[in-house]
Each structure stands twice: as structure tokens, then as C-alpha cells.
Image (spheres, helix red, strand yellow):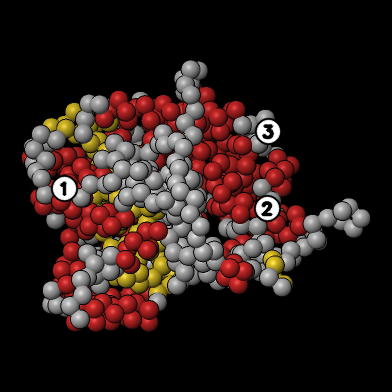
């Protein structure tokens, strides 16, 4: 499969028709149906869009920077031309009236949204097992989860079904599945990318970002995705940098912080060894490392699992069965609400709504939500201090490689703690990237996490790209998909 | 922290969620262990620390008030579970005689 960069170049120069690119893409997607990366694929619309690009080219018209590139989009991003389900029975059959801003930007740049990818219901989960439409399988081992909640997007890119995909990251939902699937995933700083048309989960935490096979492709996508949007008043007003141009500079002299809290108890030996190996590579590229401390890390998971459910309990109040979504019968209005939500929402979503409702309820607000909001300030302060000393922070993305389906399904707290290294970036609003950095003894991928200050995405992409110039981990293709990859 | 079936039912009602018997019973232990985990926050030194409600310090974002086309009633009702004559149709809100 061609990368984003190669596809757009090939189409623009007439080396390969966009229609052929799309045909191959659709063939790979249908051959890989058993991993259930996609909830919906629109072959007809995608081929028509590809033909329009080929026609535009034959007329000599200017083509967008992503012309002809098939892109998969997580199904919590609204599309007017395809269903938007959020992986929930509540929204089965829902048809959005508008497109998410990121979808508009991609298609304006010539990319083609080929389909919608599977996710944990309303992006709540770390394994994609919480989808009402069945779990996605990890392309490296179908008995294992792809991570979550953007598991469909990460699996689709890992299996080389599409060159890139969009995910959303509220507590690690781009970086964790990227790590478990061996692909590159960026969570931009809060406010860098528009959330207009992203179905809200935790509004002070949610951010949309790219998942690709390498950092260069992620940078190309960020050039299109980033920047202010009048319809999302939380987007930063300043113009973003040219990410694709920033990645070529060497990282000689880069200062990399190593937080000892990210290398403590709970980190598996294999992940630890691979991350240390990756840090050695950064050193050979001229980076200087420094031991740092993020002293409030131990509170991050508890803080997050109060703040995010509190915001979710409010955001998901809109799913009441009146104007859209599933409606169940009931004697009066309250009973209709309760029955519609009781039937339409899955176990994890209900669990989080109840945690959030409890944390915000009279008598508990101070002890839970208010306390967590103050702890959040301490966690932000940790990063502010760290970034006054270092350019980027390096550590693991996940404590372990991909776990088996069902392994953590009955223990919600254990599942929550698998996000322990990714949660702090969302609480602080900073950016983070997951970069493939090795494989365990079973051949499962391992991710290196790099974190940067609020709008430090260019530095992260540059560091990741320089690392990928020196390593081959990102080129690894799951064995079951090598043949489809070669045929394309 | 101990949690009773009654507590779970009360929160589910506040959250407007019907729970089946076995569902509610399962949540008792799960929510209790999660609430127990939150207890560790008590040790965090937050006496003089202000809360963070938002990661970015953006304020007063203004834009021009420019009229734009709306979606119109047909489109707005596209996903309605029940609609009638251009309106969303919902169960009776007030009991007889309450209005």
C-alpha cells in the first residue's frame, strides 16, 4: 500500500489514477472484514469521488494536497453522507445533518472518506470491545484487542487497509490503540483541531487527531486538520505551523525528559526495554536526556475517571430518545427517557454516566468533582515545570502490549488503569504521539510516547520522523496482511 | 466505600437510566471499587490550588453575528423517532389538569 504522501503524489503526477487507488483500497477492506475495523464503507460514493478527481486532473485543474487519498474516519465524527453511530445502539440508523469540520477539511483537500471505523461506544473504553456492533480484532493477533477507543481506525491503518485514519483522544484513545497496533498516532494539544461535529464525550479533554503509518503522513494530515474554526470557540486563534516542513530538521541538541513515574511498577519488562532502546536511538541522533519528575502522576487516573465521566454524564444527557436516536415506550416523559437510555446505552457508558452523575450530585460534588478539578491543576503544573526544563518528554504509551479479548472486560478498574500513561496529557491539554518502537516476544507492537507542550506538535512530529528515519519498526506489517499489502 | 443497591438505584434515577435487576446488582460492587480508587485523591495537597475546568485559558471568543441558512424543518426532523406536522412528537409532559 502507498502512503498518504505517495498516493497524493502519484495521483497528482498522473502515475496512478485515483480510481485505481480506491479500487485497491476497497478490495483490501472487504478482504479484511473479519477484523471488523469498519462499521460502514461507502464504495459507490468513494469511487465516484475518485473518478471526479481523475476527471479534474484530466481537465488540468489544480488538485488538493491529499488528492485521491482514502481516509477512514472514526464513527464519532459526524458525516452527512454516511451513518454516524458512535458504536451505540442508541444511534443505530442515525444520519447526521452535517459533516464534522475535520471531515470537510479532509475532503476539501482532495481526500476521500471511504468509511467509518469501529470504536468503543461513545469513545468510552480502551479495547473497542464496548462497541454495540461487536469488537474490532488486532491485526497482529485476532485473539487480542486493538486498543481503544479508536481501535477501528488503528486496526485499519495497521492492516494497511487505508493509508491514514482519524481518531479522537479523550484519555489516550488515539495513542493507546496506535501503540497496540504498531502505527503512529498523534493527539494534538487541546484547541489545535476543531471539535465541531465530534460527538462530545469529555469536552475539556476531547481532541481529534491523525493515525498513520508514519510521522510524515501524520504531519501532512495535520497541515489540513489544524487551525481555528469559527464554529468551535475552543480552537486556538493563531495559525498553526507547516508541520510537514518542520519534520526534516535534525534533532541534534533536543532535550528529552524521562519522568521516573512512567518507568515504575506495573510497566512490563518488554515494554520498558523497548522504550529504553528507543531513547538510546534518540541519543544517537543527538538528543540529550534528563531525568525529570511529574510528581502528581499517581493521581492522574483517579482525577481523569472523575472529570471525564462528569463531563460525559452532562454531554450524554442529550440522548433522551426525543429528537433522534432510539426511543422506547413509557407511561410518561421521565419513563420514556429512562427506558430509551436504559435500552440504547451499553454497560460501560451507563457506568460512566453513573460515576459522573454521582460525582456531580449534591453532597458529593466537593469531595469528587471539585477535588479532581484541583488535582488537575497540580498535574498541569507538573508539565509546566517539566517543559521549562526539557523540549519533549519520553516514556511508554501503555504498560503492556495488546491484551486478549475478554481479559479485562469484567474488571472495569483494571481497564481504566491501562490508560495510566496517556491520561495526564489530556488533563493538561498538551500534545502526545505514539511511535512504534519494538515488538514483544509474541511479535506484538510496542509504542514510544513523546509528549510536548500545548502547541508543540511540530516538535513531536519532527522527533518521531527523525526516529523513523533511523528505525524500521513503523514498517512492520501484520503477517496476515503482508499478502494484501504486496498485492496492492 | 460501601455502596448499596439503593444508592445505585438513586443515581440511575438521577441519570435517567432504567437498570435491569442483575445490571443494578453488578454495578454495586463495580462502582464501589471505582469509588474506593478515588479515595487516593484525598492525599493530594490541594488546599490553595484553584480548580482547572478547562485546559486552555481562552476567554471571550467573539465573532460577527452573520445570518446563515438554517437546515429547515424537514431536515431537522429527519432523525425524529416520531414527528407530526413539522413538530417532534413526544409523550404528554403534564398530567391532565396540570396545565
Instruction: Give the number of the disc on residue A194.
Output: none
Chain for numbered disc 1: A
> Judging from the image, what secondary structure is the residue with disc 2 in?
loop
| Marking on residue A362 | 3
The mark lying in front, picked from 3 and 1, is: 1
Q: Position of residue A151 (x, y in %)?
A: 38, 59
- Residue A472 lies, with reference to residue A161, above or below; the image says above
The chain ID associated with circle 2 is B
Q: Residues within 10 Å of mark 3 (few under 14, many from 20)?
A: few
**Residue A156 visible (yes or no):** no
Please indicate whether residue A348 sits to the left or right of residue A101 in the image: right
Q: CA distance from mark 1 to mark 2?
A: 49 Å
Mark 2 and mark 3 residues within 8 Å of each other at the beta carbon: no
Are discs 3 and 1 located on one and the same chain?
Answer: yes
Q: Is residue B18 left or right of residue A177?
A: right
Category of crowding for the residue at label 2, using alpha-carbon neighbours closer than 10 angstroms: few (below 14), some (14–19), many (at least 20): many
Q: Which mark is residue B17?
A: 2
Dot 1 lies on which element? helix
Residue located 20% across and 81% down the image: A59
- Nearest the viewer among A303 and A455 is A455
Chain to which mark 3 belongs: A
Amino acid at each position: 500500500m502507498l502512503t498518504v504522501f505517495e498516493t497524493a503524489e502519484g495521483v497528482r503526477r498522473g502515475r496512478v489514477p485515483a480510481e485505481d487507488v480506491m479500487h485497491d483500497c476497497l478490495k483490501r477492506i472487504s478482504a479484511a472484514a473479519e477484523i471488523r475495523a469498519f462499521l460502514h464503507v461507502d464504495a459507490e460514493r468513494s469511487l465516484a469521488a475518485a473518478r471526479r478527481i481523475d476527471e479534474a486532473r484530466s481537465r488540468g485543474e489544480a488538485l488538493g494536497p491529499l488528492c485521491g487519498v482514502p481516509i477512514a474516519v472514526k464513527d464519532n465524527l459526524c458525516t452527512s453522507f454516511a451513518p454516524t453511530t458512535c458504536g451505540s445502539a442508541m444511534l443505530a440508523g442515525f444520519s447526521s445533518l452535517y459533516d464534522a469540520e475535520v471531515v470537510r477539511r479532509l475532503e476539501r483537500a482532495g481526500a476521500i472518506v471511504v468509511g467509518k471505523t469501529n470504536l468503543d461506544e461513545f469513545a468510552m473504553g480502551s479495547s473497542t470491545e464496548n462497541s454495540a456492533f461487536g469488537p474490532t480484532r488486532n491485526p497482529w493477533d485476532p485473539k487480542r484487542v486493538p486498543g481503544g477507543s479508536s481501535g477501528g481506525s488503528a486496526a485499519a491503518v495497521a492492516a494497511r487497509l487505508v493509508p491514514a485514519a482519524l481518531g479522537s483522544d479523550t484519555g489516550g484513545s488515539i495513542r493507546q490503540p496506535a501503540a497496540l497496533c504498531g502505527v503512529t498516532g498523534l493527539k494534538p494539544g487541546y484547541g489545535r483541531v476543531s471539535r465541531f461535529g465530534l460527538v462530545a464525550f469529555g469536552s475539556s479533554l476531547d481532541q481529534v487527531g491523525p493515525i498513520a503509518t508514519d510521522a510524515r503522513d501524520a504531519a501532512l494530515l495535520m497541515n489540513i486538520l489544524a487551525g481555528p474554526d469559527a464554529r468551535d470557540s475552543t480552537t486556538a486563534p493563531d495559525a498553526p505551523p507547516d508541520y510537514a516542513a518542520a519534520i526534516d530538521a535534525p534533532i541534534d541538541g533536543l532535550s528529552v525528559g524521562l519522568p521516573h513515574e512512567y518507568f515504575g511498577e506495573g510497566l512490563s519488562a518488554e515494554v520498558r526495554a523497548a522504550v529504553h532502546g528507543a531513547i538510546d536511538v534518540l541519543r544517537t541522533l543527538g538528543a540529550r536526556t534528563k531525568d525529570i519528575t511529574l510528581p502528581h502522576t499517581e493521581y492522574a487516573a483517579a482525577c481523569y475517571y472523575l472529570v471525564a465521566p462528569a463531563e460525559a454524564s452532562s454531554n450524554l444527557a442529550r440522548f433522551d430518545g426525543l429528537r433522534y436516536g432510539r426511543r422506547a415506550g413509557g407511561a410518561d416523559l421521565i419513563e420514556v427517557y429512562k427506558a430509551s437510555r436504559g435500552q440504547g446505552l451499553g454497560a460501560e457508558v451507563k457506568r460512566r454516566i453513573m460515576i459522573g452523575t454521582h460525582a456531580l450530585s449534591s453532597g458529593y460534588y466537593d469531595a469528587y468533582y471539585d477535588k479532581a478539578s484541583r488535582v488537575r491543576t497540580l498535574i498541569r503544573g507538573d508539565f509546566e515545570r517539566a517543559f521549562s526544563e526539557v523540549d519533549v518528554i519520553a516514556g511508554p504509551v501503555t504498560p503492556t502490549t495488546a491484551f486478549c479479548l475478554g481479559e479485562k472486560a469484567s474488571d472495569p478498574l483494571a481497564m481504566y488503569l491501562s490508560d495510566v500513561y496517556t491520561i495526564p496529557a489530556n488533563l493538561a491539554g498538551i500534545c502526545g504521539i505514539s511511535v512504534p518502537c519494538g515488538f514483544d516476544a509474541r511479535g506484538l507492537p510496542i509504542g514510544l510516547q513523546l509528549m510536548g507542550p500545548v502547541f508543540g506538535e511540530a516538535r513531536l512530529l519532527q522527533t518521531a520522523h527523525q526516529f523513523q528515519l533511523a528505525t524500521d519498526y513503523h514498517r512492520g506489517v501484520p503477517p496476515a496482511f503482508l499478502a494484501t499489502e504486496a498485492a496492492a | 466505600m460501601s455502596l448499596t443497591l439503593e444508592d445505585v438505584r438513586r443515581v440511575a434515577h438521577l441519570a435517567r437510566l432504567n437498570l435491569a435487576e442483575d445490571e443494578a446488582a453488578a454495578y454495586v460492587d463495580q462502582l464501589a471499587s471505582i469509588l474506593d480508587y478515588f479515595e487516593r485523591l484525598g492525599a493530594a495537597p490541594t488546599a490553595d490550588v484553584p480548580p482547572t475546568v478547562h485546559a486552555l485559558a481562552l476567554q471571550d471568543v467573539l465573532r460577527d453575528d452573520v445570518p446563515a441558512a438554517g437546515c429547515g424543518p424537514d431536515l431537522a426532523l429527519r432523525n425524529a423517532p416520531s414527528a407530526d406536522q413539522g413538530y417532534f412528537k413526544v409523550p404528554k409532559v403534564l398530567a391532565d389538569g396540570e396545565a
